[in-house]
Amino acid sequence: EVQLLESGGGLVQPGGSLRLSCAASGFSFSNYAMTWVRQTPGKGLEWVSALSGSGRNTYYADSVKGRFTISRDNSKNTLYLQMNSLRAEDMGVYYCAKVIDGRYEYFQQWGQGTLVTVSS
Amino acid sequence: DIQMTQSPSSLSASVGDRVTITCRASQSVNSHLNWYQQKPGKAPKLLIYAASSLQSGVPSRFSGSGSGTDFTLTISSLRSEDLATYFCQQSYSTLRTFGQGTKVEIK
């Protein structure tokens, strides 16, 4: 059974940093691209970033480019999102998801999410 | 960015009703359109991918159709457990985008 477990969320001040983790199990982690999607009160569901199975190819939403870094450790079956220079508009629930990216791409399984609160 | 617009934003229907949700893209996404269901307090769950392919384990009362810019999610006979918000999402462009969601309530 595929399981994705996010952690690392919490309260951070504007301008601060946070690193999210997503521990994966139940599938061959290194064979799949992974993605982060957030859910905020203001924008609903928003795709944030994606990473190929090898980790060589990364993709970012314009709203986080230059501030967030996606990475993975395939030896630990773990996906990360390093978030720097956090803003109030980054506040929300962050989900990791397993990506199926053959002829069509879709987010096949999602974790339960971790809450990020940005406030002074 | 490709904008995804869903309608209606919310609806209320009775058990057994046929429910239709529409998603329109601001430009063609061919068939690169997915539908997700989010129950209260839970993570989104994949229902339909590639516009009309049913994800394994999803009940057959859910179906998707459309291509280009106009898409539809249909629940053929609404059940109480279908209380949820439904989102469309395009995977045509590198910048993936979601619709704003349609909240389905049970009368």
Image: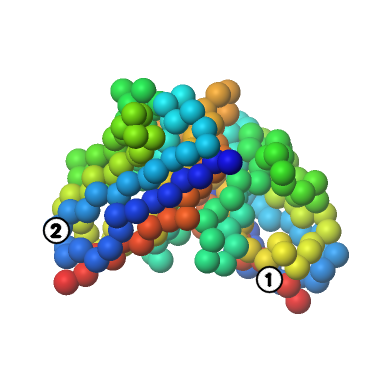
Q: Amino acid at mark 1?
A: Glu
Q: Position of residue B100 (x, y in %)?
A: 52, 57
Q: Which mark is residue A15?
A: 2
Q: Residue at x 36, y 62 (%)?
A: A115
Q: Residues within 10 Å of mark 2 (few under 14, many from 20)?
A: some
Dividing the picture into quadrants, the one containing residue B96 is top left
Q: Residue lying farthest left?
A: A15
Q: Is residue B106 something one can see in this rendering?
A: yes
Quadrant in which residue B56 is drawn: top right
Say how many tags the image has.
Answer: 2
Identify the image quadrant of the C terminus of chain A: bottom left
Residue B97 seen:
no
At x 45%, y 31%, the residue is A29
Q: Amino acid at mark 2?
A: Gly
**Does residue B18 lie above or below A46 as drawn?**
below
Q: Is residue A90 above or below residue B73?
A: below
Task: Give the image location of residue B90, x and y in percent.
Answer: 53, 40
What is the chain identity of the residue bearing mark 2?
Answer: A
Q: Which residue is mark 1?
A: B105
